[in-house]
Amino acid sequence: MKILILRSSFQTDDFVRNEYADLILRLENECQAEIDIIGDEMVETCHGASLQTLPDCFMIATGGVENLFKRIWSVETQGFASLQTVTLIADGRNNSLAAALEILTYLGNHGAEGRIVHGTNEEIISAVVKTFQETSLQGRIGLFGQPSDWLIASGVDRDVLHQRYGIEVIDMDLQRLVDDIKTTPQIEAVKVAQAMVKRAKGIVEPSDADMVEAAKAYLAIKKICQEEYLDAMTIRCFDIVKACGTTSCLALALLNDEGIVAGCEGDMQTLMSMFLAKRLCGEAAFMANPSQLTDDSSMLAHCTIPLTMCDETIVRSHFESSIGVAIQGLLPLTDYTLFKWGGPQLDRYFVTEAKAVETPYSNHFCRTQITFNVNLKPYLLQHSIGNHHVIIRGRHADQIRQFMLKNGASEIVSE
């Protein structure tokens, strides 16, 4: 995290470092803070910081820095003020609390959220750690086969994943998975299939044999994820349909429930959207296709969904192939966040909040279908980031925007 210390022209950088030596040391060591000091004599030359360089936190070291803060928090950022809560550290010495109170009021007058962290060094450190615990995306992602042939705009630059987010992408041999599916013990698969049948509201197309084969796919994928220490995975799923006569829809649903983020079709941009939803929001996400749009509503659909997102589930066959097992999830009519993080550099995103108004069913779409009271036509038909989008239970748009601001991604706004 980055902390900018503001001081008046009556004091020096050395004064600040000596006066606040213990606090600065603890911020650097315990919060991994990068700290810069700036004096109010620079108020005339200090240009408003860009959104990419605004600090995570301001430490007010003395009084007399209000205009300096105002200059930094310039008109360039005021239009985005609601997207970032400004944290001000002020322990009270050297009129710091008085200045922080003036700044907090200024922020409120301009529609921005702010907070003051005040107290002993121990209390300040504790509050800063709690507030700025970074969302870590570091982990291992398994790519089971290459992205599906129709995904011509859904890849991610692996150097960006590795260097910026600490993510390692592991190419998994799809034949290894096929072999494991075929050699999974029948008795273990039967237990999984029976548990799913008992859990479901109903079974429509699949036979008992279909359920067992889908359970084998689940056990085989899970086994490889455990052997390779994978935090997330995505699969070229239609190749499994051809090679094994079953689907991975049940497997992905169960893996997402168990904390392994699992996506379809080798779509890395959507998998990263799901991965962020899990790490940042603590929620499993539904990867879906926008399928039917009106001026008042948007319906999305897909053949697999985390079971924990649903009030009830019905076991169906896979929509496109009529093979194997898929999930028709009946979701609660509540608040959701619709989200996509995309671009090869992960430098763009779309996010909005909406209320689910219907969980329809039509044989013309994938098995799980959900309709929201939001018009996505202006965004999807002109500026869409790919096909798949993710649906997250709850309202998480501000949380996602704050993460994106810190990581330099530009929001695509539906007009």
Image: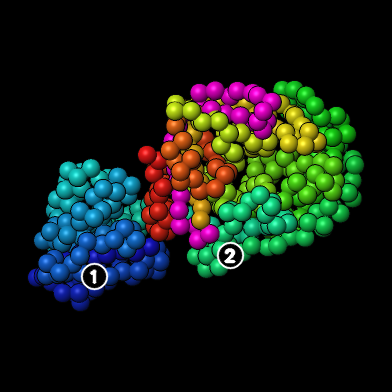
Whole-percent x and y of residue 53?
Answer: 32, 63
Q: Residues within 10 Å of mark 2 (few under 14, many from 20)?
A: some
Secondary element under disc 1, as helix, strand or loop, is strand
Q: Nearer the viewer, residue 45 or 413?
A: 413
Callout 1 touching callout 2 (CB < 8 Å): no
Quadrant where the N terminus sits is bottom left
Q: What residue is drawn where x is 82% and y is 41%? A: 246
Count of labels shown?
A: 2
Could you say which disc has been placed on residue 393 in the image? none
Magenta stretch: includes residue 94: no
Q: Quadrant of residue 405?
A: bottom left
Badge 1 amino acid: Ile
Residue 14 seen from this side? yes
| Pointer 1 residue | 37
Q: Can you name the residue that lies furthest to the bottom here?
A: 14
Residues rendered magenta in the picture: 344-371
On the image, numbered disc 2 is attached to which residue?
158
Of 27 and 267, the residue lying toward us? 267
Cα distance between the residues tagged 1 and 2: 36 Å
- Residue 66 at what x, y percent from top left? 14, 57
Q: Return the x and y of residue 187 as percentages of the image width and height.
A: 90, 40
Q: Who is closer to the viewer here, 233 or 258?
A: 233
Regarding residue 55, the answer to whether it shows in the image is: no
Whether residue 398 sits left or right of residue 268 in the image: it is: left
Q: Nearer the viewer, mark 1 or mark 2?
A: 2
Q: Earlier in the sequence, mark 1 or mark 2?
A: 1
Q: Please state which amino acid type lies under the numbered disc 2.
A: Arg
